[in-house]
Image (cartoon, rainbow, N blue to C red):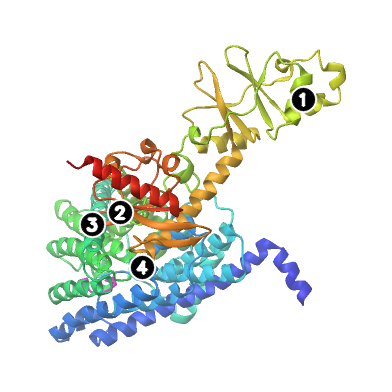
């Protein structure tokens, strides 16, 4: 039996498939569990669950007001003291784990997220359940991967399996779940491990269906596009959805920014969000909870135009306050809610102007997909999920049309999605991929070495002697007197003539055996280094001043780039700890990191204001690493072009002597500047 298990584990892909099935089962169970917990929380808070909108008005006003307040009082300490990752809508935290922690998520996150989200939503918090289900599924996938000590890539794959299973269980949409994981969590359609993600998504759907039956999230009306001319109002819907999505993203993060700046105990902030929801809910109970009943009403044309417009703007505010104050829940369902309201409003206006057009229900359905596409910047996922909800091919043309238009509108105004905006505020960019986000903005000059080179007229005898005395494997060949790069020699090319050394020693010169030069410009980035190295199989690359002149200025070593990349990854991991852990909130006195290094928070001198790290050459002049810049209301992981502003504080890593020297320099510069 042991031999069979060992053979199974050695078959890596098969083993990953089996684990993906396990993750799918757990994600399906997690999705079912969170729904039952929300149902229990809702009944406990409002003494009702089924036909919520019809029955909640019979609940005493004091109870409807106090329910979200008490929910906030309970949720705040749970998140603050047990797992801060459970705060907010969850998906950015999963993306952050994949990006900076090799997919590793703390085991407690699944449990804390489930409890916190169930209490937030059950007590009336205006958020969705899909984000929590995604984070719970991802946490379970990560825990399994860590238990089996899988490689980094496989850990991320199982995290994505959990996310796919969560969305699939939430919407009965296995294909949409898999695309969500690939398009949003991993951000890579070329991912090699697509089959485990799809299998996990399908298994999760099967588990949820077997427990709850063929649950349909929305009662979708029959769709019909009465005339091709309706593509015109669907275009208008796409434009409106894109603008509404931008408004939603902006409002949400503005609210988070205001709460971050508020000098009020963090664990009590969700209570204030509960007070707001309690007051709003007295007049608009549609703002309580997930809001699926209200969405179904929009799909069946139950709401007048004024109500749909009111729902649209109030949902944006209610969700922003709930999440900004520290509640736990997702933004996917609110996006569907806002989209249904937007589409329903456009549909009503269209039907009034052109009675031959379809009713507002189909427009509400397309609006759901359009707003989700624009907020997530994942139009393919939005299209497939709406299609899986309807199982109607006729909806595909207007749905695709509106989703693409809304995404184009949103991205033309705001480059970040509702998920990546949170990472962007921490100085983390996914727009160019994980390696590029570290290497693309750093010039080769920062890692330039002199390097050993040969002149074109040097004889083979001297070339071989010099090459054997050096660890370098690539040697530029220069024109004597001008320093112009004319070619390169590699050790492999020298090997071909090594055994004829005595015969050719004084007959062959460097330019005879050199090949066409491979080089980089002085303005090239470290990402360019890796690309050129990969395409030409070179460990060192010559750097020249320009394409026209090609005057040699030095060498850049691939190993130096790799070393720099690993150092930046460690720096970002440490910065992430500073951002997320309470004990690092005030580290003015410093924290020992061992081996003589300390983590310390410092003021910046006035001379830093308005300048970038690149201009200051901070690392070279101080021997310190800035891992975080604390700006007003947010923490930022810096890059070379980050500009310092008045009031900024920096978190640095370095030896105590260098830290004290910098502090003394700051004090002396302040003294010199004073009258």
Tag nearer the camera, 4 or 3: 4
- State the SS at label 1: helix
Q: Marks 1 and 4: CB-CB under 8 Å? A: no
Q: Would you say residue 415 is visible in this rendering?
A: no
Q: At x 49% / y 36%, what residue is drawn?
A: 446
Mark 2–mark 4 distance (CA, rounded to whole Å): 54 Å
Identify the residue under disc 1.
464
Mark 4–mark 3 distance (CA, rounded to whole Å): 22 Å
**Position of 618 relative to 536 (above/below):** below
User: Is 352 left, or right, of 502 in this rendering?
Assistant: left
Identify the residue under disc 3.
254
Mark 1–mark 4 distance (CA, rounded to whole Å): 59 Å
Q: Marks 4 and 3: CB-CB under 8 Å? A: no
User: Is 260 left, or right, of 60 in this rendering?
Assistant: right
Local crowd at mark 3 within 10 Å, few (<14), some, or many (≥20)? some
**Position of 620 relative to 488 (above/below):** below
Mark 3–mark 1 distance (CA, rounded to whole Å): 64 Å
Identify the residue under disc 4.
582
Q: In which quarter of the image is the C terminus?
A: top left
Identify the residue under disc 2.
225
Which span is picked out in magenta?
A: 286-292
Which quarter of the picture shows residue 123? bottom left
- State the SS at label 3: helix
Q: Does the magenta stretch include residue 288?
A: yes
Front residue of this view, candidates 571 and 175: 571
Q: Would you say residue 321 is visible in this rendering?
A: yes
Q: Marks 1 and 2: CB-CB under 8 Å? A: no
Which quarter of the picture shows residue 76? bottom left
Label 2 or label 4, whichever comes before in sequence order: 2
Front residue of this view, candidates 148 and 239: 148
Tag nearer the camera, 2 or 4: 4
Tag nearer the camera, 2 or 3: 3
């Amino acid at each position: 039996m042991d031999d069979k298990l060992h053979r199974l584990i050695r078959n890596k892909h098969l083993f990953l498939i089996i684990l993906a099935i396990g993750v799918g089962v757990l994600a399906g169970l997690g999705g079912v569990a969170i729904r039952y917990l929300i149902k229990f929380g809702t009944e406990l808070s409002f003494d009702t669950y089924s036909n919520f909108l019809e029955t909640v008005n019979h609940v005493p006003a004091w109870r409807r007001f106090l329910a979200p307040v008490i929910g906030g009082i309970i949720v705040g300490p749970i998140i603050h003291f047990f797992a801060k990752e459970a705060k907010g809508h969850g998906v950015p935290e999963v993306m952050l784990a994949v990006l900076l922690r090799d997919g590793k998520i703390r085991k407690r996150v699944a449990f804390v997220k489930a409890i916190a989200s169930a209490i937030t939503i059950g007590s009336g918090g205006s958020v969705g359940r899909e984000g929590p289900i995604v984070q719970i599924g991802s946490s379970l996938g990560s825990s399994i991967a860590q238990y089996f000590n899988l490689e980094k890539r496989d850990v991320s794959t199982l995290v994505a399996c959990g996310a796919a299973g969560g969305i699939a269980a939430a919407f009965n949409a296995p294909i949409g779940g898999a695309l969500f994981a690939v398009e949003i969590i991993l951000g890579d359609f070329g991912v090699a491990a697509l089959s485990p993600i799809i299998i996990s998504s399908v298994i999760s759907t099967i588990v949820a269906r077997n427990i709850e039956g063929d649950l349909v999230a929305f009662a979708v009306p029959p769709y019909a596009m009465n005339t091709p001319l309706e593509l015109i109002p669907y275009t208008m819907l796409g434009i409106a959805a894109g603008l509404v999505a931008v408004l939603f993203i902006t409002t949400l993060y503005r609210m988070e920014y205001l709460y971050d700046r508020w000098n009020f105990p963090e664990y009590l902030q969700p209570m204030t969000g509960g007070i707001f929801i309690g007051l709003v809910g007295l007049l608009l109970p549609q703002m309580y909870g997930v809001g699926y009943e209200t969405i179904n009403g929009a799909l069946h044309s139950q709401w007048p135009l004024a109500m749909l417009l009111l729902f649209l703007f109030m949902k944006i505010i209610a969700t922003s306050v709930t999440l900004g104050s520290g509640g736990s829940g997702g933004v996917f369902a609110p996006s569907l809610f806002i989209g249904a309201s937007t589409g329903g409003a456009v549909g009503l206006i269209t039907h009034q102007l052109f009675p031959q057009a379809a009713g507002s229900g189909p427009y509400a359905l397309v609006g759901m997909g359009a707003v989700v596409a624009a907020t997530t910047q994942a139009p393919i996922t939005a299209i497939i999920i709406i299609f899986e909800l309807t199982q109607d091919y006729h909806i595909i043309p207007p749905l695709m049309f509106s989703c693409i238009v809304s995404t184009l509108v949103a991205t033309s105004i705001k480059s970040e999605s509702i998920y990546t905006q949170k990472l962007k505020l921490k100085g983390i960019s996914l727009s160019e991929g994980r390696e590029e986000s570290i290497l693309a903005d750093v010039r080769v000059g920062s890692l330039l070495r002199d390097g050993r080179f040969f002149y074109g007229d040097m004889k083979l005898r001297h070339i071989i002697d010099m090459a054997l005395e050096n660890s370098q494997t690539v040697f530029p060949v220069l024109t004597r007197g001008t320093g112009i790069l004319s070619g390169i020699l590699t050790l492999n090319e020298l090997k071909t003539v090594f055994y004829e050394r005595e015969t050719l020693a004084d007959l062959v010169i460097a330019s005879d055996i050199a090949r066409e030069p491979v080089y980089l410009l002085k303005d090239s980035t470290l990402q360019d280094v890796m690309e050129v190295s990969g395409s030409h199989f070179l460990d060192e690359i010559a750097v020249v001043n320009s394409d026209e002149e090609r005057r040699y200025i030095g060498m850049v070593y691939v190993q130096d780039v790799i070393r720099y990349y690993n150092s930046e990854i460690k720096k970002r991991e440490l910065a992430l700890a500073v951002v997320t852990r309470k004990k690092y909130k005030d580290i003015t006195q410093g924290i020992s990191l061992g081996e003589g290094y300390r983590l310390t928070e410092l003021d910046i001198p006035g001379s830093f204001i308005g300048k970038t790290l690149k201009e200051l050459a901070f690392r070279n002049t101080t021997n310190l690493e800035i891992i975080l810049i604390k700006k007003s209301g947010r923490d930022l992981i810096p890059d070379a072009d980050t500009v310092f502003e008045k009031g900024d504080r920096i978190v640095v890593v370095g030896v105590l002597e260098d830290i004290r020297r910098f502090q003394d320099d700051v004090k002396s510069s302040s003294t010199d500047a004073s009258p």
